[in-house]
Amino acid sequence: MPLWFVSCSEQCFYLLMGEASVARTAHPLLSVVVPTRNERDNITPLLAELAQALAGVRTEVIIVDDSDDDTPAVITAEAQRYPDDFRVRLVHREAGPARAGGLATAVNAGMQRAAAKYVAVIDADLQHPPERLRALFDEAVAHNADVVLATRYRAGGSYDGLDGVSRRLISVGLKWVAKIVFPDQLLRVSDPLGGFFLVRRSIIEGVTLRPIGYKISLELLVRCRWVRLVEVPYHFHTRNAGQSKSDFKQGMLVLRHMGRLVREVPAAGRFWKFCLVGASGVIVNLALFALLLAHHWHPLAVLFAATEASILSNFFLNSILTWRDVRNLRKQDWFWRAVMYHGAVAPVIALYLGTFALLVKFHDPTSLLQILSLVPALFLSYWLARRVVFAPRESWASLFRRTPRTRTLQEALDDTPLVTDDEAGGLPALPEAGAAQGSV
Ligand code: GDD
Ligand code: MN
């Protein structure tokens, strides 16, 4: 029986090589997590291409394997061909509960074991070109980035390797669903659902990742706090050997994954939570309107009371639901925040009351236009609520400063001062962990 079969749930390659080789190995600069399931014919070219691409970068490759074929044996044999500065570790998960969650938990397990400052994830089947990983790493170092995403959807990239019109439609469709559900995090990200990326390890520290299915990048982008994101285009190739494991069911899992993120992460889908609270305000408003009119209140008093009640209930619900993560607000601020909230929602309230009046009084068909004008008003109110009402005091000063946006590789390169060979002297120095982060 081969040695890799002996251990129960997992084993690392360095156990086979002996502790001495581990002690000799210096700290890696880059950890590369590779999930594998029955990829025996892809391991050799993958490792060769990775080693070539990452020459000069001390790397550990962590292969998290759920194979039923002899992929682990191939990995073990191949690993011995590489020097200490390209260390290959195998984490083999035995069939059964250890493999629960499949790809998602495999990538997570690999990332938890990573030791380097930067952690990358790449597929084993060469659909993600290993030579682009070097570009991802170089970008991260050059720009002190928190996240570097390889993208199929920018100039210089392509998704030709996605076979079939339906797979492409699903890919583009799901990408847009993700962008619409999580606009704060993803609107400017061109490929939030790809499986090829690199992150600064510190952004995942202390964050409980609970991905479902294949979209680990979605999980990271929504759950982790990051500021600087750079995108690097790449051509998504056709699979080298073996079979894809993703299917229609995986597509559906993405929707479940998104639902979980909306529920568990306060900042996820915040705009939609704000809208939902707004809708509850309409119900409060109408109910109170009917109730007070029935009690023969003066119509103006009814209007005032019903409107005020709905604004206050919205403010309360937004505080405990939409912005429940904003904990550092001072108690004495609440009064002023409630006052400011009136200002923030004033455009929506004005349009709502106007529409309501037109509908009730004149049955005016132009009210459709009013209803439509609610949309920009809603955006404005959300922006004011986010940037003023529920923002920490300190951020008020920076209200009109632009938030950092995603940059293309070209833009990033354009801003990089050119370094001559004399000055370069090997690899660029790594910035200190936790260094001050500005906008890119
Ligand atoms: N450990 C482990 N366990 N690895 C797995 C499992 C599993 O259950 N299922 C798949 N993998 C590995 C494969 O061996 C491969 O290296 C990688 O994960 C991607 O699996 P594929 O089956 O090749 O998926 P795909 O090509 O259809 O999907 C890829 O492209 C999508 C973009 O359209 C992946 O990169 C996705 O993450 C990506 O979203
Ligand atoms: Mn694939």
Image (cartoon, rainbow, N blue to C red):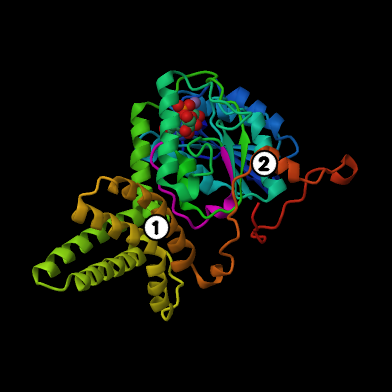
Q: For the residue labelled by badge 2, is the local secondary structure a helix, a strand or a loop?
A: helix
What x and y, as percent, mark residue 232?
Answer: 63, 36
The three-letter amino acid code for the residue at tag 2 is Phe
The three-letter amino acid code for the residue at tag 1 is Pro
Residue 427 found in image quarter:
top right
Residue 409 found in image quarter:
top right
Tell me, yes or no, whether the highlighted magenta stretch contains residue 203. Answer: yes
Range drawn in magenta: 197-213
Give me the residue at 47% from left, 55% from top: 207
What x and y, as percent, mark residue 32?
Answer: 59, 39
Give me the residue at 37% from left, 50% from top: 373
Which residue position is annotated with label 1?
A: 266
Neighbourhood count class around disc 1 (C-alpha, 10 Å): few under 14, some 14–19, many 20 upward: some
**Total of numbered circles in the picture?**
2
Give me the residue at 41% from left, 64% from top: 344
Which residue position is annotated with label 2?
A: 137
- Going from the N terminus, do you reach mark 1 or mark 2 first? 2
Q: Is residue 160 visible?
A: yes
